[in-house]
Structures are given as C-alpha cells and as structure tokens.
Image: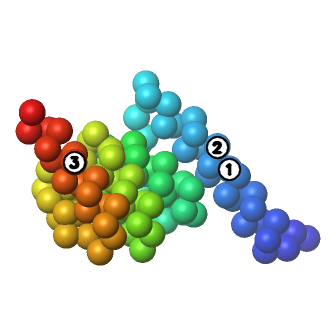
C-alpha cells in the first residue's frame, strides 16, 4: 500500500508533465483540464497562469495566495486589460509593476 507522500508526489509529477506538454506554444489547454490544474501545486499553477487563455481561469488565478502565480497572470499575453488593471492594485509590488508595464506595452 502506498503512503500519502508517494501518492502526492506521483500526482505532482504527473500534473507537472501534463502542464509541460500542454503549454507548448502550439497547443491550447482544454478548459476542463485547466480547471483541474488551477487547484494544483505552485509549479503547476504558475505554468498555467503564464499560458491559460480562459477568462475564468485567469480570474481565479489573479487572486491566488502566491504572488508568483499572480505575477505570471500579468505576464500572460492572453490576460485581458480588465484583469491587469485589477492587478495594478495588488499587495505585491512585483505584481503591480508588471501589470502596469503590460498595460503600457499594449497601449503602444
């Protein structure tokens, strides 16, 4: 019988491989998969935040507890300006600065 740590480690490796394969530039993550991954470990959430193109997923990840995930949301080219404007008021300075920079880039 497997202990909890082994099962959890296997889940993390499997999800990380899935995100790595799905986040290749030429592929799109299906919404059903993205919803499941949005509740995963930090590494997976960061990868998802950087490449997701679903408004519902980006809305969820913009309020993530970890600033790295929110930062990746600002860096994502699919993030709409409405979410970027909201992240300009984030509690973390890195997230705020990147959100402002992305808004400026898109205005050019």
Is any part of residue 81 visible from this angle? yes
Q: From the viewer's perspective, is the residue at label 3 or at label 1 nearer?
A: 3
Which of the 4 image quarters holds residue 17? Answer: top right
Q: Is residue 48 above or below residue 60?
A: above
Q: Residue sitting at 72 percent across and 66 percent down?
A: 8
Quote the CA–CA distance across marks 2 and 3: 31 Å
Residue at image mark 3:
101
Numbered disc 3: secondary structure:
helix
Residue at image mark 2:
17
Q: Residue sitting at 67 percent across and 58 percent down?
A: 12
Q: Is residue 19 above or below residue 60?
A: above
Numbered disc 1: secondary structure:
helix
Residue 37, numbered circle? none
Residue at image mark 1:
14
The C terminus: image quadrant:
top left
Which of the 4 image quarters holds residue 38? Answer: bottom left
Numbered disc 2: secondary structure:
helix
Q: Is residue 76 left or right of residue 45?
A: left
Residue located farthest toward the right when viewing the structure as drawn: 1
- Label pair 2/1, CB-CB below 8 angstroms: yes
């Amino acid at each position: 019988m497997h202990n909890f740590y082994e099962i959890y480690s296997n889940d993390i490796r499997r999800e990380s491989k899935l995100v790595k394969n799905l986040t290749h530039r030429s592929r799109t993550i299906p919404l059903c998969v993205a919803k499941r991954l949005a509740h995963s470990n930090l590494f997976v959430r960061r990868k998802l935040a950087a490449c997701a193109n679903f408004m519902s997923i980006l809305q969820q990840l913009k309020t993530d507890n970890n600033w790295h995930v929110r930062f990746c949301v600002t860096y994502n080219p699919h993030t709409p300006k409405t979410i970027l404007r909201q992240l300009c008021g984030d509690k973390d300075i890195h997230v705020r600065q990147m959100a402002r920079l992305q808004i400026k880039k898109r205005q050019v």
